């Protein structure tokens, strides 16, 4: 599998940015990426006050590379960049060596911080 990680720094970001990011992901981004051709799955990760990251896993290198090309061009004005006030600090291609699905199963949708 072929991954891409896009990370933004939250250092110096506006007050309340963590909740704004949660709300944006649940209300807009989740549905949009659920329909992205070639995407196997995406996760949104965050360490409050430190960083926010989108991690994408694609079925093929071609799908990942095409997405990376368009994302890199648009990243400075992407909704998350606008909310945070800066472009991603890194956009990194990664190899996904394996994915294990545990007994609890793989669930999609908002996480615990969206209650």
Image: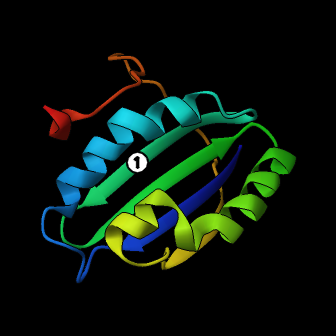
Of the 4 image quadrants, the one containing the N terminus is top right
For this orientation, the residue located farthest to the right is: 62
Residue at 65%, 52% (x, y): give it: 3
Residue 84 occupies quadrant: bottom left
Location of residue 33 in the rendering, given as x and y in whole percent from the top left corner: 57, 36
Task: Note whether residue 99 is visible.
Answer: no
* 28 relative position to 37: left or right: left
Residue at 52%, 52% (x, y): give it: 55
Q: Secondary structure at mark 1?
A: strand
Location of residue 114 in the rendering, given as x and y in whole percent from the top left corner: 19, 36
Residue at 49%, 74% (x, y): give it: 88
Residue situated in front as seen by the camera: 17 or 11: 17
The residue beneath circle 1 is: 44
Location of residue 57 in the rendering, given as x and y in whole percent from the top left corner: 63, 44
The number of numbered discs placed on residues in the rendered structure image is 1
Task: Note whether residue 100 is visible.
Answer: yes
Of the 4 image quadrants, the one containing the C terminus is top left
Residue situated in front as seen by the camera: 41 or 25: 25
Residue at 35%, 52% (x, y): give it: 45
Which of the colour schemes (rainbow, by chain, secondary structure, one colour) is used?
A: rainbow
* 86 relative position to 11: left or right: right
């Amino acid at each position: 599998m072929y991954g891409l990680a896009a990370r933004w720094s939250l250092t110096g970001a506006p007050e309340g940015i963590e909740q704004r990011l949660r709300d944006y992901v649940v209300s807009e981004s989740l549905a949009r990426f659920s329909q992205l051709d070639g995407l196997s799955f995406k996760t949104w990760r965050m360490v409050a006050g430190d960083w926010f990251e989108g991690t994408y896993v694609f079925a093929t290198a071609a799908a990942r590379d095409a997405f990376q090309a368009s994302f890199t061009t648009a990243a400075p004005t992407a909704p998350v960049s606008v909310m945070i006030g800066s472009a991603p600090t890194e956009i990194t291609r990664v190899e996904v060596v394996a994915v294990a699905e545990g007994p609890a199963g793989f669930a999609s949708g908002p996480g615990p911080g969206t209650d």
